[in-house]
Image (cartoon, rainbow, N blue to C red):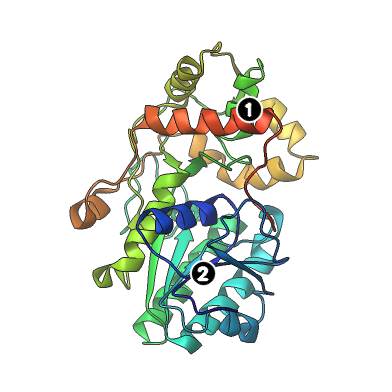
Amino acid sequence: MTTVRHVIFGTGPLAHAVMRELLARGHEQIRMVNRSGKRGDIPEQVEVVACDAYHKNAVQAATKGADVVYQCAQPAYTEWPEKFPPLQTAILEGTAANGARLIVGDNLYMYGPTGGQPLREDLPYRATGKKGVTRARMAEQLLEAHKAGKVRVAIARGSDFYGEGVLNSLLGDIVFGNLLSGKAAQVMGNIDLPHTVTYIGDFGRALAMLGERDEALGQIWHVPNAEPQLTLRAAIERIAAIAGVSAKISVMPKAMFEIISLFHPMLREFRELRYQVNAPYVVDHAKFVAAFGDSSTPFDEAVQRTVGWYRHLLSGGTTGGVA
């Protein structure tokens, strides 16, 4: 392996977004880490290595000499409680052994239902479902390690993803892919309530920015999102208008969800998160903006990029992610 300064764990959509942002900011000596070592469509100037990130020693070898490590890897969605904590522990321990700072991509599950109250970084963790409780414990582990002087950590949190490479999401293939294929966008819950969504490029940019700033360490940061008060209906109508297609929307009835989720693994996992689409779900990013400025991409511009990526995919292009 060559000498590196930036190591990204994962080669999925968020990892790709971090990689693209690092290149755009003029950074060199970038390494991406996945299980297989397969490159996919990663640029040649970026090194790709195979690593079993569940083992501290392997992580330590992959991050040797790094200044910043970005944790964007995750196990299968249905395996979070069992496999996510040991994955994070190994990455934390291996990174700490090399003295690098650790920038972690996180979500918002740990807050649990807030009754429509905007989500801020200082909210208590009130999740009761297994995935939310898992993410809460993982966040606590990271900040405790920072306070103990074990590793320097910053945590960035985003809402539901959309953008290049994002397929399995609230605004993923079931919205963009369906609309561009002449089908109805598939959603659930009350689509006339505000629901913040995060453009994957903005998430990647936020992680890269936090990796550059000492004052970011030891803290949680909500990623800036364009138009956080936008409703899902309005978002889908804007997507359809930009794509030049009909804004057909199919909302899954609650009774149907309850039945299908008994047999569908991904929907079954979402049962504990239905509160997110049955009440306003608005993310407050004022802390990040006050410290670093508003780095969000205008919604229509982000949608144009996403539509372009989906059209490329539907024409036979690659997804841009490998395991």
Q: Amino acid at mark 1?
A: Gly
Residue depicted at 39% across the width and 46% down the height? 202
| Residue furthest top in the image | 246
Q: For numbered disc 2, what is the local secondary structure?
A: helix
Given residues 272 and 199, the one toward you in this image is 199
Residue 301, image x, y percentages: 38, 30
Residue 59, image x, y percentages: 59, 80
Badge 2 density bin: few <14, some 14–19, many ≥20, Cα 10 Å = some
Mark positioned earlier in the residue sequence (2 or 1): 2
Q: For numbered disc 1, what is the local secondary structure?
A: helix
Given residues 306 and 262, the one toward you in this image is 306
Which quadrant, please, contains the N terminus? Answer: bottom right
Residue 213, above or below 186: below
Residue at the spot of label 2: 138
Residue depicted at 57% across the width and 72% down the height? 88
Q: Quadrant of residue 264?
A: top right
- Residue 108 visible within the image: no
Residue depicted at 45% across the width and 19% down the height? 242
Given residues 41 and 127, the one toward you in this image is 41
Residue at the spot of label 1: 177
